[in-house]
Amino acid sequence: MIAVQNITVRFEEKLVLDRFSLELPDSGLTALSGPSGCGKTTLLRVLAGLQCVEEGTVTVPRNPVILFQEDRLLPWRTVGEHISDVLPKSRRGEVSRWLELVELAGEEQASPSALSGGMGRRLALARALALGGGLLLLDEPFTGVDAPRAERILGRIRALGVPVVLSSHERAVVELCDRAISLEGPPLHERSPAV
């Protein structure tokens, strides 16, 4: 079970989450949607253990992995090295598998600077997937990726069998998920969105 119970998060004087609660199953794809600034990224950071809460409890599966909104690619590493660098030596042969999953096969030797914005986003996604955590937290994973490609990739992610919580402004992406939770306007206060 993935759960946050009565959590409060504040940035200086700005209250972002106020006694917010949410329960999700340990499987499937869950989309968080809502306008910018409504708390989607903050909630993902809480689930990843990167954002402290003032009060409340957080329960997540072991080893969550987060894909940040920024790609955070290293210009001195090749596309393939971005994947191999996060894999243990025993799994380094999997580089092509992860690049194929995000439709970047054949780009192993390319520099990140040679990639389009959407390709860079897919590389960052492949790197997060290769880490192989018990929960995938994806912050706007398909920015700059066309809808048909995003649908294919999301289908492959679903086949991995790992629970996913993603944020998206893209209606098409949200509709492909098993459940969608709308987070309308800050602060999120004393409610448990329907699943």
Image (tube, rainbow, N blue to C red):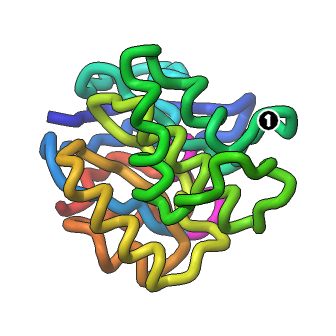
Q: Quadrant of the C terminus?
A: bottom left
Closer to the camera in the image, 161 or 164: 161
Closer to the camera in the image, 111 or 185: 111
Q: Amino acid at mark 1?
A: Leu
Closer to the camera in the image, 108 or 88: 108
- Residue 148 place in picture, x, y as percent: 45, 84
Using the rendered image of the protein, determine whether residue 17 is visible from the camera's viewpoint. no
Residue 1 in which image quadrant: top left
- Residue 57 place in picture, x, y as percent: 31, 21
**Magenta residue span:** 35-43
Direction from residue 139 to residue 161 in the image, left or right: left
Against 137, is 113 above or below? below
Residue drawn 24% across the image and 45% down it: 163
Residue for badge 1: 74
The residue at the far top in this view is: 89
Residue drawn 77% across the image and 67% down it: 116
